[in-house]
Amino acid sequence: MSKILFRLRNIPDDEVEEVRELLTSHHIDYYETSAGNWGVSMPALWVRDEHEYQEAKKLLDNYQEARSIRVREEYARLKREGKNKTVLDSLKENPVLFIAYILIVLILLYLPFKLIMEITTL
């Protein structure tokens, strides 16, 4: 019976590709499910054989530990060099989109208060 190994929702594409390569290189029989047309299903990687699941789980745990260390080191290096992305960088890259997001947040904060004020005046 198949077992879920790795959920793919909100996972970077490069990480998903690396996990696929890891499983393929170790000859682990797996398949992938998508989120479906409406995005409500569970995108994941599944291992077909329960006996291979334990091996795949160990490989995945080791990979994730190594990736975590690698990503932290990369972030620290970028931060030291002053190249890490900040909020100001996002504003500079796309000011119209940044301002649009701020306006949407302000509207979403304003509407409940306006509704409460209208209800209390009734």
Image (cartoon, rainbow, N blue to C red):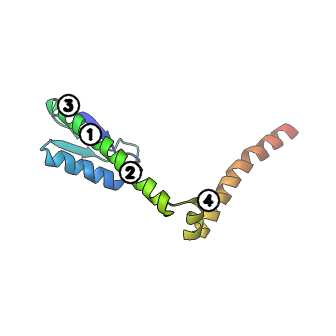
| Residue 89 x, y percent position in the rendering | 56, 65
Identify the element where label 1 is drawn: helix
Query: In the image, what residue type sits under mark 4?
Result: Tyr
Marks 4, 2: nearer the viewer: 2
* Residue 36 appears in view: no
Using the image, tell me which numbered label, if any, was put on residue 101: 4
Ranked by sequence position, the earlier of labels 4 and 2 is 2
Tag 1–tag 4 contact (CB < 8 Å): no
Residue 20 shown left or right of residue 76 in the figure: left
Using the image, tell me which numbered label, if any, was put on residue 54: 3
58 to 27, vertically: above or below:
above
4 to 113, vertically: above or below:
above
Q: CA distance from mark 4 to mark 2?
A: 28 Å
Query: In the image, what residue type sits under mark 2?
Result: Val
Label 2: which residue? Answer: 71
Q: Nearer the viewer, residue 79 or 55?
A: 79
Marks 3, 4: nearer the viewer: 3
Q: Mark 3: give few (<14), some (14-19) or many (20+) Cα within 10 Å.
A: few
